[in-house]
Image: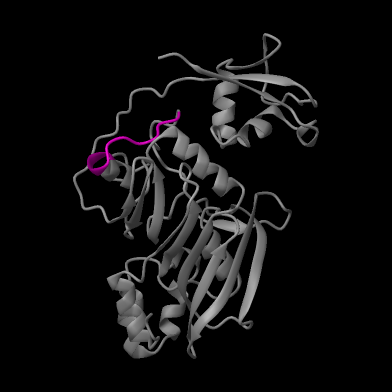
């Protein structure tokens, strides 16, 4: 297969930016690491000469890009149940259970949602990320809920653009310790790896990291717990978990961000359930987007999974 070729012209708003930053803003590249791959392979040129990632572009520069075909995938289809909410020729919407990693990563080579999708769906958008076919966005391993996957490159580009421009509707439910002081509010910060624990993220005081915005409001509250509605404006790793923990309301079951220390303070009758919860009480309950081919608005909603419905009932909330 031949490389796909395309060209872009630098606008006034992009002038003086690094080349890798400009390329990462393209829907068919979508990250600086992928942009760096193309640049390092000499596939990004201007006037016949190859460029470096640090090259500062100028208005009206004509940048030529070649996208190589995806290498053969070594992913193995996995025969496990898949809860499909919707499927057509372009995309599939699934209800991901907790405990399932979305795509292959360290320690999870062939037991991910991607492997299950390859068994049930087969064709997924490859781009040039052979270990993440079809993946447009992710949910943490221990977060359940709605997730959309692209089956071809056109759908992937269209969905990626919506996530990048923040036009996707995303609502999460969270059960947290304590009750926030305000009925609703917004957390804004730059998230980066924790300086002492690389498995965690934290808001960076010096502004280094990725900007994250979480809007939250209380749906129901009790003396020691609250059911929150969280709407994402950005989609950073562990975003909701970090913001709620730093608010003083860690999510039930989230031992990484402080819930473990709250279990002994809970009523005695609830401690076995809270301490034994094998997941984070965070659920992606709503996802809305525009179909990349038909341009029709689509909305998907899923209620609490059984293990969290049990928790909600035990705590005394009114399930919906």
- Name the image quarter holding residue 75: top left
Classify 119 as above or below 9.
below
Q: Position of residue 134 (x, y in %)?
A: 40, 39
How many discs mark residues in the rendered view? 0
**Residue 192 vertical placement versus 309 (above, below):** above
Quadrant in the picture for residue 17: top right
Q: Name the residue at 37% across, 82% down.
A: 319
User: What residue lies at 35% left-to-right and 89% top-to-bottom?
Assistant: 268
Question: Residue 6: where, in percent of width, then height?
Answer: 59, 21
In the picture shown, does residue 32 fall above or below 205? Answer: above
Residue at 36% over, 80% down? 312
- Identify the main secondary structure in magenta: loop
Work out which quarter of the rendered image holds the C terminus and state it: bottom left
Indicate yes or no whether the magenta region holds residue 123: yes
Image check: 34 left or right of 203? left
Q: Quadrant of the N terminus?
A: top left
Q: Give the residues drawn in magenta, as a range.
A: 118-127
Judging depth in this view, the residue of 183 and 148 nearest the camera is: 148
- In the rendered view, would you say 56 is above or below 247? above
Give the colour scheme shown.
one colour
Q: Residue furthest top?
A: 48
Percent x, y of residue 68:
47, 19
Q: Position of residue 250 (x, y in %)?
A: 51, 72
Q: Is residue 294 magenta?
A: no
Q: Residue at x 35, y 65 (%)?
A: 279
Q: Specify whether 157 is left or right of 275.
A: right
Outermost residue to the left: 79
């Amino acid at each position: 297969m031949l490389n796909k070729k395309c060209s872009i012209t630098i606008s006034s708003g992009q002038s003086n930016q690094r080349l890798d930053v400009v390329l990462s803003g393209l829907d068919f590249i979508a990250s600086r690491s992928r942009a760096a791959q193309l640049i390092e392979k000499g596939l990004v040129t201007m006037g016949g000469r190859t460029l470096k990632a640090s090259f500062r572009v100028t208005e009206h520069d004509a940048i030529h890009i070649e996208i190589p075909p995806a290498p053969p995938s070594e992913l193995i289809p996995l025969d496990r149940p898949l809860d499909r909410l919707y499927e057509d020729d372009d995309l599939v919407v699934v209800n991901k259970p907790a405990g399932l990693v979305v795509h292959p990563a360290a320690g999870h080579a062939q037991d991910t949602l991607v492997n299950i999708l390859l068994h049930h769906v087969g064709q997924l958008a490859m781009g040039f990320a052979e270990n993440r076919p079809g993946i447009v966005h992710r949910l943490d391993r221990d977060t359940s809920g709605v997730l959309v996957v692209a089956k071809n490159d056109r759908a992937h580009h269209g969905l990626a653009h919506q996530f990048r421009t923040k036009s996707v509707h995303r609502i999460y439910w969270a059960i947290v310790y304590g009750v926030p002081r305000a009925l609703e509010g917004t957390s804004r910060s730059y998230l980066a790896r924790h300086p002492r624990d690389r498995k965690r993220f934290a808001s960076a005081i010096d502004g280094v990291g990725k900007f994250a915005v979480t809007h939250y409001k209380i749906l129901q509250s009790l003396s020691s717990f609250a059911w929150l509605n969280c709407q994402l404006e950005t989609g950073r790793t562990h975003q909701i978990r970090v913001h709620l923990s730093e608010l003083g309301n860690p999510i039930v079951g989230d031992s990484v961000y402080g819930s473990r220390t709250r279990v002994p303070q809970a009523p005695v009758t609830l401690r076995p359930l809270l301490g034994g919860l094998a997941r984070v009480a965070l659920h992606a309950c709503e996802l809305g987007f525009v179909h990349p081919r038909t341009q029709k608005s689509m909305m998907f909603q899923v209620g609490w999974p059984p293990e969290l419905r049990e928790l909600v009932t035990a705590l005394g909330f009114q399930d919906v």
